[in-house]
């Protein structure tokens, strides 16, 4: 029997073992309901990273791992939380979350795969539903709030996230969120096999855990959330090391993901969301060690526009391109900086053809449409703007603003108000959103736009009531 078949067989055996042991967990329908409530709680906190390039990489790694599983009761989805902590978590219904702080602290895609493999194993074995079943003293809506609070935390630390959890349930109930050591061992065993079967280096889980564990010296208040909810890390490291000594060389990692792409995403997340001064200092420190590191120069190119240092950003992006000529991800970000600098033509010329690359297709389409709008070619920009709105309007809300301007130039007052209302709705400027949406309802003929405007007003009223309650 080949190594690949052995791995597949062991995975199936472990899965069957999980399914037998999980017979007493909450029902599939209950878990689906809770997953829906949980995602609603998460969306209200506006803490998910929507950057297409970063999300595409995490989702691609996750999909490769989940593809090794037999059919599951839930479709697996992978998300990035805008939080600098070291944490990752599986939640009801096959939703897997990893904090950006964990991603930016890892060294390679195999470490990310190791963490995602472990969390996917928790989901496949329905360990989360077991924990929920043990806590039926509270209702599922409350538990959804608890999980959302513990998972998301706060931009400045864990205290706010803990407050959300404690407000949702009595003190002591949050211990429900910690996996048992038996759960952890099971997830490690299965996670390693899944990542290996997906052609990632299984050593990634070990080195990833070691990085998380290295933060333990900060003290109990600063221990990464991952260690609080995933106990026994020291014993787990010993077990995983022993397993790797016996089986770690059985497969040759060949997952097809360019290691440089992971480096770009890692530094992109730091550049987009990290504290500017601290991140710049860290990038400069890395460049002192390796002055020609294209991924770090790229990170600088992402970071510096946040403080309007566009010329410096372009210098770093050109340095990155000097090492990685025609790299599409670096070209795309260079085009973005030219857009910010007001040079639509240079941006458009630089990004030609990038919309054909799946991981950045939507982003490239949006930037190209933005460039055309900037050059006064609204009619040509419209197609790209509408395509962006259809697939990722919440990610690129300014596409609605540009469409409002296109409608204004055509003297389409009803659509101008609709698109402005949608723009303000997406950026949570609800007072302005309601004003323009009501104007659009009065002017628009019956149809999809008018219905959408009414639905948005209804959603804003619903959110207002929830905040009051």
Image: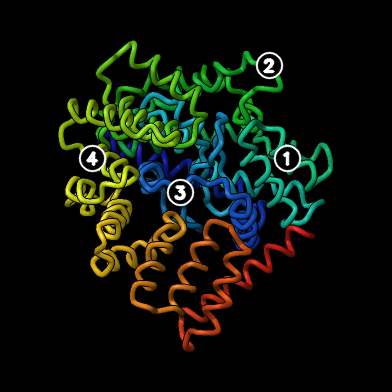
Q: Nearer the viewer, mark 2 or mark 4?
A: 4
On residue 50, which mark appears? 3
Q: Alpha carbon of mark 3 to alpha carbon of mark 4: how far?
A: 20 Å
Residue 158 at x, y percent in the picture = 67, 32
Q: Alpha carbon of mark 2 to alpha carbon of mark 3: how far?
A: 32 Å
The C terminus sits in image quarter: bottom right
**Residue on which the image places disc 1:** 176
* Mark 2 crowd level (few <14, some 14–19, many ≥20, 10 Å Cα): few
Q: Is residue 387 left or right of residue 328?
A: right
Q: Earlier in the sequence, mark 2 or mark 3?
A: 3
Residue, far right: 170
- Residue at coordinates 34% horizontally, 38% vertically from top-left? 197
The quarter of the picture where residue 18 lies is top right
On residue 331, which mark appears? 4
Q: Alpha carbon of mark 1 to alpha carbon of mark 4: how far?
A: 47 Å
Q: Nearer the viewer, residue 431 or 112?
A: 431
- Residue at coordinates 52% horizontally, 68% vertically from top-left? 421
Q: Nearer the viewer, mark 3 or mark 4?
A: 4
Query: Do callouts 2 and 4 mark residues in contact (Cβ within 8 Å)?
Result: no
Q: Earlier in the sequence, mark 3 or mark 4?
A: 3
Q: Is residue 314 above or below residue 19?
A: above
């Amino acid at each position: 029997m080949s190594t690949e078949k052995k791995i597949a067989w062991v995975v199936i055996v472990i899965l069957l073992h999980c399914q037998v042991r999980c017979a007493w967990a909450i029902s599939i329908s209950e878990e689906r309901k809770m997953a829906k409530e949980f995602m609603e709680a998460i969306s209200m906190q506006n803490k998910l990273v929507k950057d297409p390039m970063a999300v595409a990489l995490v989702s691609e790694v996750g999909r490769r791992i989940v593809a090794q599983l037999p059919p599951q009761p839930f479709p697996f989805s992978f998300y990035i939380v805008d939080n600098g902590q070291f944490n990752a978590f599986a939640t009801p219904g096959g939703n897997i979350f990893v904090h950006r702080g964990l991603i930016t602290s890892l060294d390679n895609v195999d470490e990310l795969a190791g963490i995602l493999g472990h969390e996917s194993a928790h989901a496949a074995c329905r360990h989360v539903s077991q924990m929920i079943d043990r806590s039926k003293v509270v209702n599922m809506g409350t538990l959804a709030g608890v999980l959302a609070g513990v998972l998301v935390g706060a931009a400045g630390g864990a205290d706010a996230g803990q407050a959300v959890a404690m407000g949702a349930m009595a003190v002591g109930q949050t211990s429900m969120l910690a996996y048992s050591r038996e759960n952890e061992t099971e997830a490690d065993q299965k996670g390693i096999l899944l990542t290996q079967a997906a052609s990632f280096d299984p050593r990634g889980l070990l080195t990833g855990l070691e990085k998380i564990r290295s933060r333990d010296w900060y003290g109990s208040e600063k221990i990464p959330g991952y260690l609080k909810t995933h106990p026994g890390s020291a014993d787990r490291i010993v077990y995983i090391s022993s397993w790797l000594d016996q089986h770690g060389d059985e497969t040759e990692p060949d997952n097809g993901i360019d290691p440089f792409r992971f480096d770009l995403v890692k530094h992109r997340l730091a550049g987009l969301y990290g504290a500017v001064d601290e991140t710049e200092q860290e990038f400069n420190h890395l460049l002192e060690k390796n002055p020609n590191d294209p991924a770090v120069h790229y990170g600088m190119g992402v970071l510096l526009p946040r403080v309007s240092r566009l010329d410096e950003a372009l210098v770093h992006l050109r340095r990155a391109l000097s090492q990685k000529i025609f790299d599409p991800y670096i070209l795309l970000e260079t085009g973005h900086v030219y857009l910010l600098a007001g040079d639509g033509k240079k941006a458009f010329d630089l990004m030609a053809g990038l919309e054909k690359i799946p991981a950045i297709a939507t982003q490239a389409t949006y930037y190209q449409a933005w460039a055309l709008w900037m050059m006064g070619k609204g009619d040509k920009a419209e197609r790209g703007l509408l395509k962006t709105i259809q697939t990722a309007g919440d990610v690129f809300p300014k596409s609605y603003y540009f469409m409002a301007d296109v409608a204004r130039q055509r003297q389409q007052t009803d659509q101008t108000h609709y698109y402005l209302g949608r723009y303000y709705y997406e950026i949570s400027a609800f007072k302005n959103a309601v004003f323009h949406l009501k104007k659009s309802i009065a002017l628009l003929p019956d149809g999809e736009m008018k219905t959408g405007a009414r639905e948005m007003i209804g959603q804003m009223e619903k959110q207002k009531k929830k905040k009051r309650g």
